[in-house]
């Protein structure tokens, strides 16, 4: 905006300077030329009167008189070549008197005649008049240049006064967008900008009220949801401890893991900041696949379908293990509910060897063409569900710095892209060995 304001003001100043300066320079130089011409005419006319006076008195016209008038009175005037023709020259009875040296071009000429028949012709060099005219033009040009410099200085100052309030206003909007809803800046003195700033301040106040209400709701909902989940966790732990049947203890352990994951999901749903900025670490994909296999093998067996896990990458990745399990669990659950045939979860290296892609696919009918572009939008579902699962999974992947994409519609293939960890930074070799505390299932490899 500053550059545009400076350009507009300088354009206006330049137009005014040209409209006023060019005609002024032309008129000034013309006035100087006319002044020099009038001065030469006055000299010639004065000499003509002196000659007529002597002719009237019957006196002769001496050479000295003509030479005296050829020499100027002022030092800045040039010496004139003068020719005086006395009356009767046409009959051969008159006299012609010439004084001064011939003048080269360019020159100024003045011819004066009287009723007595006397003619005076004066010629002077035009260079002094040209120099004076050039000086006038240069003065006008300098004035135009000074006007442009002053206009640039004023435009620069005015542009700062106009742009600074807008910069402050943008900073206030950025502060409100970053969560500082009560950010304020001083008034600018420009009515339109102050109106926008006041409205922005009122918007920030309304946002502050809404955020306070949402935080209160999140706190209440978190308390109301965590209390029964905590009681359920304690009950499942008690069942696991007092039961003597291994199958019951195993089911209780799995249920306890589901409750813990549900508690974490509830926490993330109620905390948008935690959902957007996850804590990533170097993890093994095999650990994640083991957890998913233990959780989903039984449901797939009851449905008479196969669930196949394959780790072709064999490298650690940078991710949040709990959130990655939640994302893959959402895709596996959708494959179980809406897909068909064999469901495959395959982890492989990307083409550039810098990332890992985990593909979840089944042999079902896939995603409809009109639904595919909006499949990760909240509330979008092709089977009458809430449409939250895939949208939440997409947000969780973005929070980890990864991507969740629908790479194939029929049969459906969802791809999770993560950054791979170089082998030199393998967490099993970089981290020092220490005591291992297990609270729940033990990791196993297959």
Image (tube, helix red, strand yellow):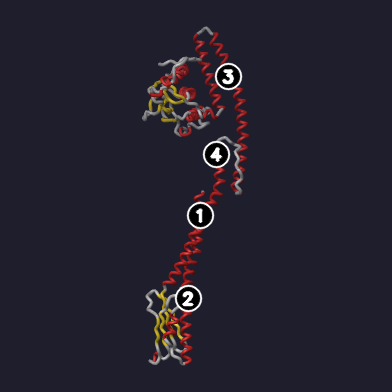
Task: State which mark lies toward you, 4 or 3.
Answer: 4
Q: Residue 74 carries which label?
A: 2
Asked if labels 3 and 2 touch by Cβ distance under 8 angstroms, the answer is: no
Asked if labels 1 and 4 touch by Cβ distance under 8 angstroms, the answer is: no
The spot of residue 148 in percent (x, y) is 49, 58
Cα distance between the residues tagged 3 and 1: 70 Å
The mark nearer the N terminus, 2 or 3, is 2
- Depicted 105 relative to depicted 208: above or below: below
Q: Can residue 337 be spotted in the picture?
A: no
Q: Nearer the viewer, residue 376 or 305?
A: 376
Cα distance between the residues tagged 2 and 1: 43 Å
The mark nearer the N terminus, 4 or 2, is 2
The spot of residue 248 in percent (x, y) is 51, 10
- Find disc 4 in the rendering and name its residue: 174
Q: How crowded is mark 2: few (under 14 residues within 10 Å), some or many (20 or more)?
A: few
Asked if labels 1 and 2 touch by Cβ distance under 8 angstroms, the answer is: no
Cα distance between the residues tagged 2 and 3: 114 Å
- Find disc 1 in the rendering and name its residue: 152
- Find disc 3 in the rendering and name its residue: 229
At horizontal 47% and vertical 89% (from top left) the residue drawn is 54
| Residue at disc 1, secondary structure | helix
């Amino acid at each position: 905006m500053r550059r545009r304001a400076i350009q507009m003001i300088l354009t206006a100043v330049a137009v005014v300077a040209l409209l006023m300066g060019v005609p002024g320079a032309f008129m000034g130089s013309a006035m100087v030329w006319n002044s020099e011409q009038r001065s030469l005419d006055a000299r010639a006319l004065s000499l003509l009167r002196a000659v007529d006076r002597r002719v009237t008195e019957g006196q002769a016209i001496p050479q000295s008189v003509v030479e005296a008038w050829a020499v100027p009175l002022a030092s800045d005037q040039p010496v004139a070549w003068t020719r005086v023709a006395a009356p009767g020259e046409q009959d051969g009875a008159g006299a012609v008197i010439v004084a001064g040296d011939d003048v080269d071009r360019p020159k100024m000429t003045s011819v004066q005649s009287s009723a007595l028949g006397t003619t005076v012709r004066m010629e002077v060099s035009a260079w002094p008049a040209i120099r004076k005219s050039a000086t006038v033009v240069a003065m006008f040009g300098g004035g135009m240049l000074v006007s442009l410099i002053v206009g640039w200085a004023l435009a620069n100052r005015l542009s700062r006064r106009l742009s600074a309030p807008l910069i402050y206003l943008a900073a206030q909007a950025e502060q409100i967008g970053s969560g500082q809803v009560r950010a304020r800046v001083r008034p600018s003195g420009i009515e339109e900008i102050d109106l926008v700033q006041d409205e922005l301040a009122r918007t920030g106040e309304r946002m502050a009220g809404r955020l306070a209400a949402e935080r209160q709701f999140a706190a209440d909902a978190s308390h109301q949801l965590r209390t029964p989940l905590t009681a359920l966790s304690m009950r499942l732990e008690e069942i696991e401890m007092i039961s003597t049947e291994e199958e019951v203890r195993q089911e209780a352990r799995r249920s306890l893991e589901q409750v813990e994951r549900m508690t974490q999901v509830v926490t993330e749903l109620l905390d948008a900041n935690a959902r957007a900025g996850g804590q990533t670490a170097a993890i093994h994909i095999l650990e994640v696949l083991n957890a998913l296999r233990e959780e989903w093998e039984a449901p797939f067996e009851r449905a008479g379908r196969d669930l196949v896990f394959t780790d072709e990458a064999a490298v650690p990745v940078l991710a949040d293990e709990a959130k990655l399990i939640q994302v893959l669990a959402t895709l596996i659950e959708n494959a179980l509910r809406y897909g068909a045939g064999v469901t495959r979860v395959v982890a492989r290296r990307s083409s550039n060897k810098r990332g890992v892609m985990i593909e979840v696919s089944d042999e079902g009918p896939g995603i409809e063409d009109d639904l595919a572009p909006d499949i990760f939008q909240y509330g979008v579902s092709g089977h009458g569900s809430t449409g939250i699962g895939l949208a939440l999974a997409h947000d969780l992947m973005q929070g980890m710095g990864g991507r969740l994409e629908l790479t194939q519609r029929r049969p459906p293939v969802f791809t999770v892209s993560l950054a791979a960890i170089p082998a030199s930074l393998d967490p099993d070799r970089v981290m020092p060995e220490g005591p291992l505390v297990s609270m729940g299932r033990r990791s196993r490899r297959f």
